[in-house]
Image (cartoon, grey):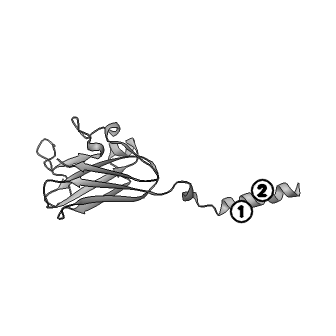
Amino acid sequence: MHKRSAALSTLLFALAFADPGAAQPASTVEITFEVGASTGAVMAALYDSEAGYGARKPVRAVRVDADSGRVVARFEGLPPGTYALQAFHDLNGDGRMNTNVVGFPTEPFAFSNNAQPRGGPASWSAAAFQLGPQGAAQTVTIR
């Protein structure tokens, strides 16, 4: 009984100091945007679930100036899983997606996998991609 008690104590001690993040290494998503203008900024939002995607509740969001020849958004420290991205090119720098009177975007936009919209944002299933321990990278054209 004494050996069993000692083994249990050792196990409990190890679990108490275990790093819960060690089981899933952090990964990085890198999205390179092809843009048509070098003004304003690209606003990108990353989602980790279909519910969050539909409700527009991202797990991460970034703003990347479009004044350089290369526009790259990096999302670091993410657990492996399924993600999707929505982005738009904020041409006038006002921080929001501009729309016309009927609500159609007047600034270029895009989704991961270059998924195409159908009467609204591209579907989660079309935009979703897998992030593994080695990370993920995509090139997305904003139109």
For label 2, the crowd category at 10 Å Cα-Cα, with few meaning under 14, some 14 to 19 and many 20 or more, is few
For label 1, the crowd category at 10 Å Cα-Cα, with few meaning under 14, some 14 to 19 and many 20 or more, is few
> What secondary structure is marked by label 1?
helix
Q: Picture coordinates of residue 80 (x, y %)?
A: 46, 50
> What secondary structure is marked by label 2?
helix
Q: How many labels does the image show?
A: 2
Q: Residue at x 32, y 42 (%)?
A: 127
The answer to which of 110 and 34 lies nearer the viewer is 34
| Sequence-wise first label, 1 or 2 | 2
Q: Residue at x 34, y 39 (%)?
A: 124
Residue contact at pointers 1 and 2, CB within 8 angstroms: no
Q: What residue is pinned by disc 2?
A: 8
Q: In this view, does 19 lie to the left or right of 129?
A: right
Location of the N terminus (image quadrant): bottom right
Q: In this view, does 30 lie to the left or right of 43?
A: right
The answer to which of 51 and 78 lies nearer the viewer is 78
Furthest residue in direction front, as rendered: 134
Q: Is residue 81 above or below residue 95?
A: above
Q: Which residue is drawn at 65% across and 64% down?
A: 17
Furthest residue in direction left, as rendered: 101
Residue 121 picture quarter:
top left
Q: Is residue 48 left or right of residue 102?
A: right
Furthest residue in direction top, as rendered: 118
Q: Picture coordinates of residue 123 (x, y %)?
A: 30, 37
The answer to which of 101 and 121 lies nearer the viewer is 121
Q: Which residue is drawn at 71% across and 62% down?
A: 13
User: What amino acid does circle 2 point to?
Assistant: Leu
Q: What residue is pinned by disc 1?
A: 13
Q: In this view, does 136 lie to the left or right of 119?
A: right
